[in-house]
Amino acid sequence: MRGLAASGSAGSSAANQPLPPSAAALRGQPWRPRPVVANPLLRYAIPVAALAYLVAASASIDVNWQRVALGLERARVLFRGFAAPDFTSRWAFIQTGILESLAMTVVATALGILLSVPFAFGAARNIAPLPVYLFCRAFIAVARSFQEIVIAIFFVVMVGFGPLAGALTLAFATIGFLGKLLAEDIEDIDPRPLEALRATGASWLKQMSYAVVPQIYPRFIGLSVYRLDINFRESSVIGIVGAGGIGGALNTSISRYEYSTTAAILIVVIAIVLLSEYASGVIRKRVQ
């Protein structure tokens, strides 16, 4: 009892001690987070400098208002064709491009997934040796450094025009996309199942199969379906440089000023993208 009384008196005396002057001055004021930039002069100089650069960069853009006016007239003609899409006269042309894009998308996604999995495991620092980790990380960084249309130009030069160049382009981009995200998911797994299997002397393959794969499987399915959707949308872009798909048909219709056919192509592409979005959402929901 004496101990409790002594501790209570000590606690009450500590609570009754006066606050330091700095803490007393802050009493009753709302809490504010610490600023990112401690120096107040630099804190205000950075946004002012960024705004000045934005104004200077905007002023450096040469705008020809006469061409803008002509462009508005061309836009009116373009959207007039969009108001009456033509699905009949060029349907065989559109169908060929759509089927080619779908074939490119499926083949490229399957190939990219098969190749991205070993790169993802090699790029995870918690399960891969350092030389393997550095090599896989470097390859993934290179795969993610270029836009798909730039990669498509290289493959068109190497293998020629057609869907093969497009499929290789999308597969290469899929490796960079899935490899990076899966590697990050592997690095964020719960390490306890992996450590338990290592303690039992399980082989590396069993460690991956029973400790790593179950933790990343739902995420892997979701990313794969999402990449399938991305590859179809990208197939309509890389076709402009001759890499096959509906992009070539789209570019041809625009160059011929057949804007009604262009509108039909875009409507078909949008419909397929919306359908794939819905399907991917259902698949991700059921898997996760």
Image: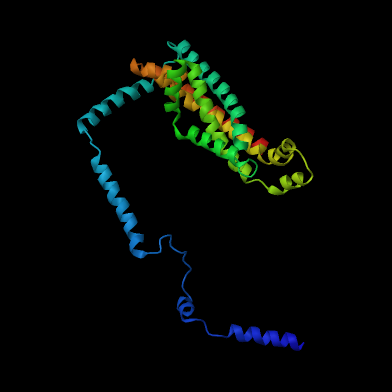
**Position of 135 relative to 12 (above/below):** above
Task: Give the left or right position of residue 228, taking residue 197 as reference.
Answer: left
Which quadrant is the N terminus positioned in? bottom right
Residue 143 percent coordinates (x, y): 50, 32
**Position of 18 relative to 45 (above/below):** below
The structure residue drawn at horizontal position 23% and vertical position 43%, both measured from the top left corner, is: 59
Q: Coloured how? A: rainbow
The structure residue drawn at horizontal position 77% and vertical position 40%, both measured from the top left corner, is: 202
Which quadrant is the C terminus positioned in? top right
Residue 161 figure quarter: top left
Question: Which is nearer the eye, 160 or 64?
Answer: 160
Residue 112 figure quarter: top right
Residue 42 percent coordinates (x, y): 34, 61
Asked if residue 260 can be seen in this view, the reply is no
**Position of 242 relative to 136 (above/below):** above
Task: Give the left or right position of residue 49, taking residue 7 as reference.
Answer: left
Instruction: Point out the residue furthest to the front here.
Output: 131
The structure residue drawn at horizontal position 40% and vertical position 61%, both measured from the top left corner, is: 37
Residue 282 percent coordinates (x, y): 62, 33
Question: Which is nearer the eye, 103 or 264?
Answer: 103
Instruction: Point out the residue furthest to the bottom here.
Output: 2
Residue 201 percent coordinates (x, y): 78, 42
The structure residue drawn at horizontal position 49% and vertical position 27%, both measured from the top left corner, is: 233
Asked if residue 150 can be seen in this view, the reply is yes
Instruction: Point out the residue furthest to the right here.
Output: 200
Question: Which is nearer the eye, 38 or 94?
Answer: 38
